[in-house]
Every structure is written in structure tokens, then in C-alpha cells.
Image (cartoon, grey):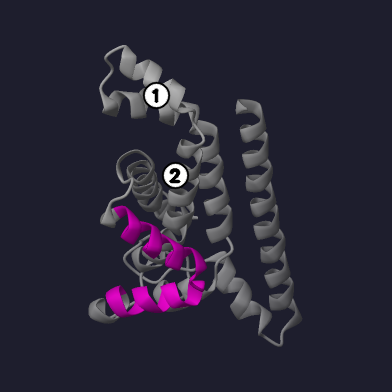
């Protein structure tokens, strides 16, 4: 939970600001084209590749797995989803709405923050919830970054246990009691992901 929360707090602002740049400022620029290209790569990259990247970038130099390394790996999964969702939602906002705000003498930053982002709020929040639902069950990135810990550990500076990695570890054991714990973890993750997807759909429909 701590790593998912940290990844969301890291990835969401970066994703929203990048999506705003692509939709509002980056038309026809080389930086926007490069950002979209990198974003497409991150969207299609296997999560285990992202985990290995953070492993080489963070874990190897610091000589140890940690919750922060796991959070960074998960945030690289959150960021492209939020970028794509934010850009698409902002592009759906009618230009007449922006022009009406500009006609009142409103500066561009105010139009973006108070008009377009407000109008696209439901879609952006839905994208964030779906990104959280995706990383909630990720195992591969955490195997190389956060590793595992058989004891409760609240410090993000050390190796941390996570439900997906624990499921993977216990499911491979020959002991029925550990396998039952793994199935219980599967049930919990399924409920969590289902709840987030339902919340996203309900929120989007209500705002719409």
C-alpha cells in the first residue's frame, strides 16, 4: 500500500503537468514529439523491463532494494497512463470554452487551471484510478526493486514486502497453508482492483 501510494504521489503530478504541456503548449514542437514517443514506449514496455531499469539505476548503486526503488518503478507505469489520459481529456474540451475565457482577458495559465482542467477533471481522475488499479497487482517490477521482507517493515529505505510478491513467493511453496494465503492475497487484490474500476466508472458517469 505504501509503495502504491508513493508511486501515485510521484507519478500523478508529473503525468498531469506533462499532459497539460502536450495539449496546451506543445503543438508542433520537437519536445512534444519526443515526449509522446517516450510515453508510447513506456506504455508498451513490459513492466519487468521497467523493474530492471530501476534496478540498474537505483538498487545497484545503493547496494540494496528499498521501498523507494519499488515506488519509482511503479511510478514509471503510472506516468504514461496519466499523461495519455490528461492529454486526451484536454483535447476533448471545446475550443469555444477556451476562447470565451480568453475574451474575458483571462491569462492562459488561469484558463488551463480554472477552465480546461476543471472541465476535464472527471476523465483525469478516472485515468489516475485506472493507473492505480494497474500498479496494484504488479509483481515483476517489485521483484528487482523492493524485493521482499518476511517481517513487517514501515521504512521505505529497506526492502519491503508487497502483496503481489508475497503471492508469487507463497504460491511456489509446496505447503498447502502457504498456498491458501496466496489465494487469499489474490482475492484481496482482485477486490481492490474491481473496486477501483467501479469507482472510476461511477465517478466518470456522475461527473458526465
Seen in the picture, residue 123 relative to 5 is either above or below; the reply is above
> Outermost residue toward the front?
28
Closest to the observer: 142 or 51? 51
Compared across the picture, whether 41 is left or right of 187 comes to left
Q: In the displayed structure, would residue 76 be above or below residue 84?
A: below
Task: Please say if the residues under marks 1 and 2 sit with CB atoms less than 8 Å apart.
Answer: no
61 to the left or right of 64: left
- The crowd level at tag 2 (other Cα within 10 Å; few <14, some 14-19, many 20+) is many
User: Residue 57 magenta-drawn?
Assistant: yes
Q: Quadrant of residue 63?
A: bottom left
| Left or right of residue 23, residue 187 in this image | right
| Residue at image mark 2 | 87
The residue under the point 34% across, 49% down is 14
Who comes first in sequence, dot 1 or dot 2?
2
**Residue 149 in view in this figure:** no
Q: Range of the magenta residues?
A: 32-58
Residue 49 in the image: above or below residue 199 = below
Q: Secondary structure at mark 2?
A: helix
Q: Is residue 124 magenta?
A: no
Residue 206 seen anywhere in this rendered image of the structure: yes
Residue at image point 49% right, 76% down = 48
Q: Residue furthest bottom?
A: 174
Q: Quadrant of the image for the C terminus?
A: top right
Q: Main secondary structure of the magenta part?
A: helix
The percent coordinates of residue 120 (x first, y second) are 49, 32
* Picture residue at 53% right of the left edge, 46% below the top: 127
* Residue 172 screen position, x and y as percent: 66, 84
**Residue carrying label 1:** 98
Q: Quadrant of residue 184?
A: bottom right
Q: Position of residue 191 (x, y in %)?
A: 70, 53
15 sits to left or right of 191? left
Amino acid at each position: 500500500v505504501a509503495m502504491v501510494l508513493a508511486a501515485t504521489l510521484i507519478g500523478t503530478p508529473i503525468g498531469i503537468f506533462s499532459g497539460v504541456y502536450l495539449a496546451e503548449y506543445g503543438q508542433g514542437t520537437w519536445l512534444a514529439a519526443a515526449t509522446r514517443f517516450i510515453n508510447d514506449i513506456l506504455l508498451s514496455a513490459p513492466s519487468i523491463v521497467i523493474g530492471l531499469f530501476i534496478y540498474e539505476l537505483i538498487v545497484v548503486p545503493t547496494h540494496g532494494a528499498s521501498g523507494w526503488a519499488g515506488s519509482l518503478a511503479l511510478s514509471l507505469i503510472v506516468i504514461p497512463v496519466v499523461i495519455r489520459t490528461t492529454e486526451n481529456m484536454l483535447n476533448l474540451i471545446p475550443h469555444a470554452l477556451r476562447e470565451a475565457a480568453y475574451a474575458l482577458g483571462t491569462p492562459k495559465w488561469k484558463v488551463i487551471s480554472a477552465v480546461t482542467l476543471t472541465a476535464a477533471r472527471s476523465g483525469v481522475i478516472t485515468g489516475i484510478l485506472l493507473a492505480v488499479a494497474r500498479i496494484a497487482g504488479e509483481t515483476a517490477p517489485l521483484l528487482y526493486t523492493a524485493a521482499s521482507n518476511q517481517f513487517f517493515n514501515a521504512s521505505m529505505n529497506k526492502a519491503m514486502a508487497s502483496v503481489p510478491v508475497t503471492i508469487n513467493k507463497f504460491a511456489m511453496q509446496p505447503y498447502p497453508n502457504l498456498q491458501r494465503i496466496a489465494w487469499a492475497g489474490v482475492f484481496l487484490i482482485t477486490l481492490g482492483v474491481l473496486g477501483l474500476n467501479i469507482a472510476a466508472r461511477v465517478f466518470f458517469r456522475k461527473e458526465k
